[in-house]
Amino acid sequence: MKFVLGILLGIIPALDTQQSYVGSAVARSGGMVLYAEEHEEFYEDGRRIRLNTIFRSQEQGVLATRSVDFSRNPFLPDFVMEDRRTGYLEGAEMTTGGIRLFVRRNKLEGTRDAIIPLEKAMVVDAGFNNFIQAHWDSLIAGNKLFMKFGVPARLDSYGFRVYRDGETLVNGKRAFLVKCDIDNFILRLFLDPIMLTYDSESRRLLVYEGISNISNERGENHVVKIMYQPYGP
């Protein structure tokens, strides 16, 4: 039953137990190629249980790695991401009393953490797309989704809104535009929204536009447009 439901939701492939895809990240301003994301997903009994990602640039090689484990919760996966250049590390894990968020700024500093309580409609990291796909029909019908997003870098969670923002064609196929912005009127004046383009049939991500989890040489997160082949999460 879970296998059939997953296919209907567009969350999993019908037969394969492993899937690979690549995202190409360019600077949203100027279009310079910045890095590539190499993703490998693993499935068990028709359910996505693990995601490994390598972030790589042509000039510097491997920039960062990420491992995500969905086996305990599809929306709140255990994950660790590490920047190989600086030693920056962040992640999350389910624990007694809530979600443990942790961060290390560089190789010379220790790891700091905080446990935040579980809340309704909470996500971390790659659990975001699972949340979108699980609530697809409501989203596409025009309803706003509200979620709490755990942010390890801040050791806290923040409210966000997600809603359909039109549709377009990508490679001749129908796709939906989805906007994600912070659920705070004042902060929305200063923070640009994240724009996402989803394939209407597979319900998987085709294009991501917004802040990246990869930083530049000054330690500032890139603002990117990522195009996935053949699709993303």
Image (cartoon, rainbow, N blue to C red):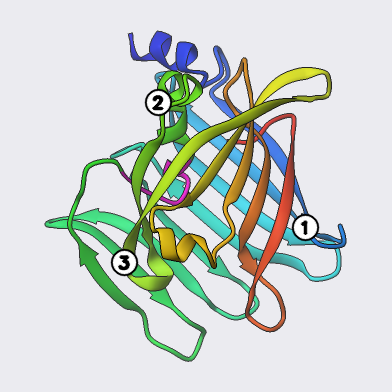
Q: Alpha-carbon neighbours of circle 2 within 10 Å: few (<14), some, or many (≥20)?
A: some
Circle 1: element type: loop
- Residue 11 visible? The answer is no
Q: Which residues are magenta?
A: 122-128
Circle 3: residue type: Asp
Disc 3 designates what residue?
156
- N-terminal label among 3 and 1: 1
Disc 2 designates what residue?
134
- N-terminal label among 1 and 2: 1
Q: Is residue 124 magenta?
A: yes
Disc 1 designates what residue?
28
Location of residue 222 by image quarter: bottom right
> Where is residue 181 shown, x and y percent of the image?
49, 51
> Mark 1 to mark 2: distance in Å?
29 Å
> Mark 3 to mark 2: distance in Å?
24 Å
Instruction: Establish if 31 lies above or below 175.
Output: below
Circle 2: residue type: Ala
